[in-house]
Amino acid sequence: MALRLVLNCQQIPAVFRYSTVFHHPRKILSNIGSDRQLTILRYTRNARNTSAESFAPRQTIVPTEVQGIAIESGYIDPSKIWRSLLFTAAFSTGSFIGVSIWEYETIRSRAMQALRSKLSVNWFKDRMKHNRQEMEQWRKDLTGWWSKLSPGERIFAPICALNVIVYGLWRIPSLAPTMVKYFASNPAAKAVCWPMFLSTFSHYSLFHIMANMYVLHSFSHAAVATLGREQFLGVYLSAGVIASFASHVFKTVVRQPGLSLGASGAIMGILAYVCSQYPDTQLSILFLPMYTFSAGAAIKVIMGIDLAGVLLGWKIFDHAAHLGGALFGLFWCYIGNQNVWPLREHFIGYWHEMRGPPKK
């Protein structure tokens, strides 16, 4: 089960220590009292009646700190939900438009390469005349390595690289204010929209990113084989932002601010799609391969746990985000793939007219 980490501003104690434990398909469990501890969140608050707080002014709560960086918390403006909704709709639409253009340009490029095969020129040779042989060998090695990857691994590799880069940025103390502001989703913050997207590539814990990337790698092959890389990317990006929006709505309704980050919402979208598309596929638990269960049963259990987390108010993980991503994956399996994705053909027709005939 893929889990999106949430730092709860009202419930986490003064020193939050955590380590991660993996449970297939993805799991990162906080462990208070771990020997490997990290002081990532300090919280102090004035004595007050929390039940009467609701949408109280911000000054009633002393700001939370992450790595010494103050976090806007204690008040969630309900009107921001509209901003989040508009951004989610615009971003999801833009994602599918973007991948449709990518699909068109890929087909167009391949067609032109076939026509111009006799006239093709290696640009490495034009720009690096003194290092032709070395660059040619480098290109061949890279091309050889890339050709050995499966279609799923080819789309997984750049996504994983982006997640690793963002994880590395969290290790740079001087970038802490920027990371907290833009790479952690928080409905109480001034910057609401772009963190909904950027937080889906953000991991603070090493085991968190390892678990998430393991699950994404495990399910990306089946998803790409069914959807194709362009549609896969559209679903992945949209599921991530929709998961963030679900988290915003939940936190606003329960009046509970907090930071959320991780690729879990996006991965839950892919996981739900694959498990619904291939419900009879047998899965197993990591390190316990003798225990198997169907993919259809697995997604029901996972979503059931997240639903229970939402209803019972579990605050260790962002169950609302998981549920939002999974619901979008189910929607795409039963409705989107058959009825929404084919609509791109109308846009591609307009795009083809704008591009005009290829240059000779």
Image (cartoon, rainbow, N blue to C red):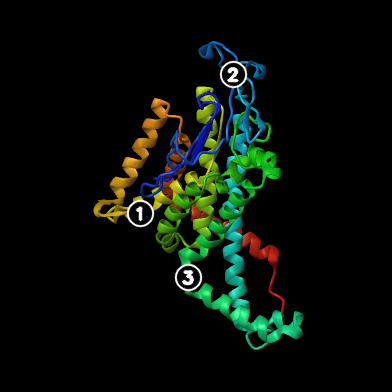
Tell which tag, 3 or 2, sits nearer the viewer. 2
Q: Quadrant of the C terminus?
A: bottom right
Quarter of the view holding residue 196: top right
Please name whichever residue, 62 or 125, is drawn nearer the observer in this view of the structure: 62
Instruction: Tell me the amino acid under the disc marked 3.
Output: Leu
How far apart, in angstroms, are the residues tagged by discs 3 and 2? 52 Å
Residue where numbered disc 3 is placed:
149
Q: Tag 1: residue type?
A: Gln
Q: Nearer the viewer, residue 114 or 314?
A: 314
Q: Earlier in the sequence, mark 3 or mark 2?
A: 2
Question: What distance separates the C-alpha of mark 3 from that of mark 1?
Answer: 23 Å
Question: Which labelled disc corresponds to residue 347?
Answer: none
- Tell me the crowding category of disc 3: few under 14, some 14 to 19, or many 20 or more residues within 10 angstroms, Cα based: few
Where does residue 305 sit, x and y in percent of width and height?
35, 36
Q: Are marks 3 and 2 in contact (CB under 8 Å)?
A: no
- Image quadrant assignment for residue 137: bottom right
Identify residue for label 2. Answer: 45
Q: Which residue is mark 1?
A: 277
Q: Earlier in the sequence, mark 3 or mark 1?
A: 3
Q: Nearer the viewer, mark 1 or mark 2?
A: 2
| Crowd tier of the residue under label 1, counting other residues whose Cα lies within 10 Å: few below 14, some 14–19, many 20 or above | some
